[in-house]
Image: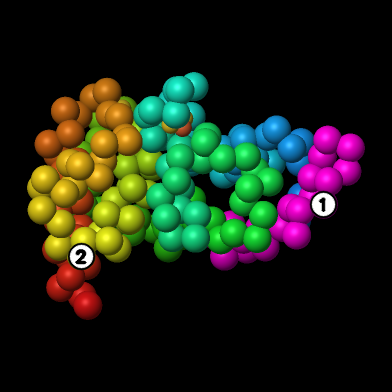
């Protein structure tokens, strides 16, 4: 439960399976809370217009741009960041990105990987069209997207084979 104390709020949330309690400015964005308070700097900031998707995380299993939420809105929620999906080394989506050369500078990659988790959860065996449509909120300035789409299709196929 969020408690207001003179412009500040107490919050309690789960991040990558760990419980955190904190007192934050009520105006602090979730992306800043993750990066500055929890030092989870894998969640990137690539714009100030909520367009690039570099800050994408999972909130209760849904892909969310963490620059579009206040930290206090995450009170009681379960959050997964890029660090959470790679605790045991590269996960299957990251490996598919490597296999398909789906990154160059890598700045956008954490956001794409988190978005890919939701795509694969939602569609199991997504078509190229579905992948492209679902990536509408993520911008990559380097790759031209084709290799990213291939990587997500490969990851989905791998996941389906293991189910
Ligand atoms: Fe969140 Fe660009 S930093 S969408
Ligand atoms: Fe550079 Fe996507 S790999 S922005």
SS at badge 1: strand
Name above or below for residue 121 compared with residue 36: below
SS at badge 2: loop
Q: Is residue 98 visible?
A: no
Q: Quadrant of the C terminus?
A: bottom left
Q: Which mark is residue 3?
A: 1
Q: Which mark is residue 124?
A: 2
Which range of residues does the magenta coloring cover?
1-19
Label 1 vs 2, first from the N-terminus: 1
**Residue drawn at (38%, 42%), measured in percent from left and top?**
110
Q: Which mark is residue 118?
A: none
The percent position of residue 151, horizontal first and vertical second, equals 17, 48
**Left or right relative to 20: residue 103:** left
**Residue drawn at (26%, 36%), measured in percent from left and top?**
136
Image depth: mark 1 or mark 2 in front: 1
Q: Quadrant of ligand 2?
A: top left
How many neighbours does mark 2 have within 10 angstroms: few (below 14), some (14-19), or many (20 or more)?
some
How many neighbours does mark 1 have within 10 angstroms: few (below 14), some (14-19), or many (20 or more)?
few
């Amino acid at each position: 439960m969020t408690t207001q104390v003179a412009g500040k709020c107490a919050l309690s949330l789960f991040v990558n399976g760990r419980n955190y309690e904190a007192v934050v400015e009520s105006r602090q964005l979730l992306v800043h809370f993750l990066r500055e308070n929890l030092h989870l700097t894998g969640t990137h900031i690539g714009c100030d217009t909520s367009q690039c998707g570099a800050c994408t995380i999972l909130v209760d299993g849904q892909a969310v741009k963490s620059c579009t939420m206040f930290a206090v809105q995450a009170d009681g929620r379960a959050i997964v960041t890029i660090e959470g999906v790679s605790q045991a080394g590269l996960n299957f989506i990251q490996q598919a990105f490597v296999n398909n050369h789906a990154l160059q500078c890598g700045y956008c990659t954490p956001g794409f990987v988190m978005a890919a988790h939701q795509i694969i959860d939602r569609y199991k065996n997504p078509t190229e069209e579905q992948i492209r449509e679902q990536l509408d909120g993520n911008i990559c300035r380097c790759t031209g997207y084709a290799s990213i789409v291939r990587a997500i299709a490969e990851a989905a196929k791998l996941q389906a084979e293991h189910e």
